[in-house]
Amino acid sequence: MLWKIFPAVAGLTVVLAVLASEVLATPPSSTLVVVTARGTFADSLNVNTKFANDAKVKVSTKGDVELITQRIEAPAGSTFGWHSHPGENFNVMLQGTLTLYHDEHCSEGINYGTGDAFTTSPDQIHLARNNGSETVIFFATYFAPKTTPPTPVRLDAPLPAPGCPQ
């Protein structure tokens, strides 16, 4: 008798879990990703460059790594919702001011304006908002594992705590 009930209970559990994740997720609003480009490195990447001003860049990859770049426009008042990314993320601001909130200090925003660059890591749950009056435009580049189907660039996350911005 239990073997007849178990599949129904398991199915109901899956449905409830999916519904709960949809309710708890904080999706973006009014955010438009204009262009997304993806490419896979044919070989491992091993960059170690020193510049004339003594600045240095070191980047290395191993295995199937995908490079993903997006041009993102966010109208005034838009939010990206709480989320994370599957790999390291590098951003550069072209226009406007973007406010970034991290889950561990969710009421403290950091403003990034035209010409600023910033990063997020896979373990950082964050929310970005355009609290200004002009459209924000920025470029985001991600390192992510190459998978089939392609790895999602944005991983939804629930509201970290009551009182956090959305």
Image (tube, rainbow, N blue to C red):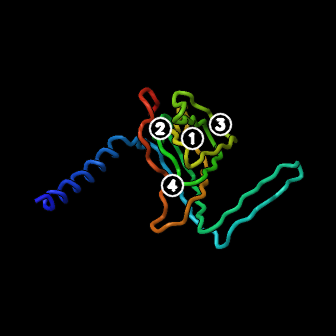
Q: Which residue is at 48% across, 34% downward?
A: 77
Q: Which mark is residue 113?
A: 3
**Which percent across, then down, holds residue 115?**
70, 42
Is disc 2 placed on a helix, strand or loop? loop
Q: Are marks 2 and 4 in contact (CB under 8 Å)?
A: no
At label 2, which amino acid type do we have?
Ser
Closer to the chain start, of discs 2 and 3, is 2
Placement of the C terminus among the 4 image quadrants: top left
Q: Residue at x 32, y 41 (%)?
A: 23
Secondary structure at badge 3 equals loop
User: What amino acid is found at the position of numbered circle 1 in the picture?
Assistant: Val
According to the image, label 4 marks what residue?
153
- In the image, residue 74 sits, relative to residue 12, either above or below, namely above
- Extreme residue toward the front, this view: 1
Please tell me the numbered disc located at residue 149: none
Give the mark nearest the N terminus, 2 or 1.
2
Q: Amino acid at mark 4?
A: Val
Nearest the camera: 136 or 117?
Answer: 117
